[in-house]
Amino acid sequence: MTRKKPLVVVTRKLPDVIETRMMELFDTRLNADDQPRSAEELLAAVQTADVLVPTVTDRIDEALIKAAGENLKLIASFGAGVDHIDLKAAKAKGITVTNTPGVLAEDTADMTMALILAVCRRINEGEQTLREGEWQGWAPTWMLGRRLYGKRIGIIGMGRIGTALARRARAFGLSVHYHNRNRVGPELEAELEATYWESLDQMLARMDIVSINCPHTPATFHILSARRLKLLQKHAVIVNTARGELIDEKTLADLLIAGDIGGAGLDVYEREPQLAPKLLRAKNTVLLPHMASATLEGRIDMGERVIINIKTFADGHKPPDRVLGELL
């Protein structure tokens, strides 16, 4: 007798190769038009599905999980972050949650380095000057940026992405400093020639560049608070490719407009897709629409991890990317 395929509901369009494979393996409901699912559509999905495949833009809160049907036993999130899912509610309901860790580190580190270069060397401003027909020719003191070589970068969160960024930073001649919940091993520290700071405040006050690469949790909300932002040196540059909620965005915008921070490269925002209007007025910023992980290879890798998690779970085994208790 053929085993019944699990009903899998996917909330957004995924790469074609991933959707094709899902259709082969599971009883899959896709989102062909790629429009974000409404609260009503998400409710219908959790009440009918065996497996829900949401993305980081879907809010899977306590109320939605409590309303889920008895068949829903797995939330296989398409993304590394899980701050959009109420993990405690899922655990209480007996629903396993998985994510897709590790596959986006290199892509995100690439974009973080690109933002550092773009802000420090004023790439965005230079290109805009050309496009608007304002360039009058080369001049010795025009459009001066800041050299990367020899500067200090402070990395907040030395996980996979932070480590990948540190390797790139070393190649550019930056001095690597970091703050992390736990100090990394001596071998990695030696490889990166990295200096550990137990005090985030002390590190921030001494850095030329600060990159945020930690997850968003209740403990890290506004880790760069108004008070901490004011510790930064006036020429310091902030780059965020992690989560917008990690920075007090309004205060950051005010400091940028006032010239009290050297610049910012942002890929994520506190209330996406909206952002503080003052950020758009700050010339010393490079703003991207949450695209640090947006490579075809990365999205396919994510989809393959989702498929592995679903297939393993459906076969009666523990999926490899379970979000475990330490995140609760």
Image (cartoon, helix red, strand yellow):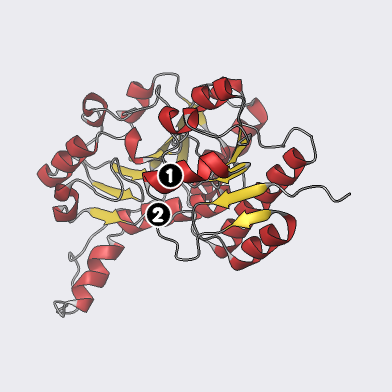
Point out the residue furthest to the front here.
1
In the rendered image, is residue 149 in sight?
A: yes
> Which residue has dot 1 on it?
58
- Residue placed furthest toward the left: 258
Residue 56 appears in the rendering: no
Give the mark nearer the N terminus: 1 vs 2.
2
Residue 189 vs residue 173, the one in the foreground? 189
- Residue 195 to residue 145: above or below: above
Q: Above or below — where is 293 with respect to 153?
A: below
Question: Which residue is located at x 39 percent, y 53 percent?
Answer: 290
Q: Is residue 216 left or right of residue 247?
A: right
Whole-percent x, y for residue 87 in the image:
51, 27
Find the distance from the CA under tag 1 to the CA under tag 2.
8 Å
Q: Is residue 161 above or below residue 215?
A: below
In this rendering, would 289 be left or right of 23? left
Q: Is residue 160 left or right of residue 141?
A: right
Characterize the local packing of mark 2: few (<14), some (14-19) or many (20 or more) Cα atoms within 10 angstroms.
Answer: some
Q: Which residue is mark 2?
A: 36
- Estimate the x, y position of residue 200 in percent, counting from the top left: 38, 23
CB within 8 Å, label 1 to label 2: yes
User: Which numbered dot is residue 262?
Assistant: none
Residue at 56% across, 43% down: 48
- x and y percentages locating residue 301 in the rendered image: 64, 55
Task: Identify residue type, mark 2.
Answer: Pro
325 or 107: nearer the viewer: 325
Q: How many marks?
A: 2
User: Quadrant of residue 226 in the image?
Assistant: top left
Residue kind at label 1, given as amino acid type: Asp
Q: Residue at x 52, y 50 (%)?
A: 168
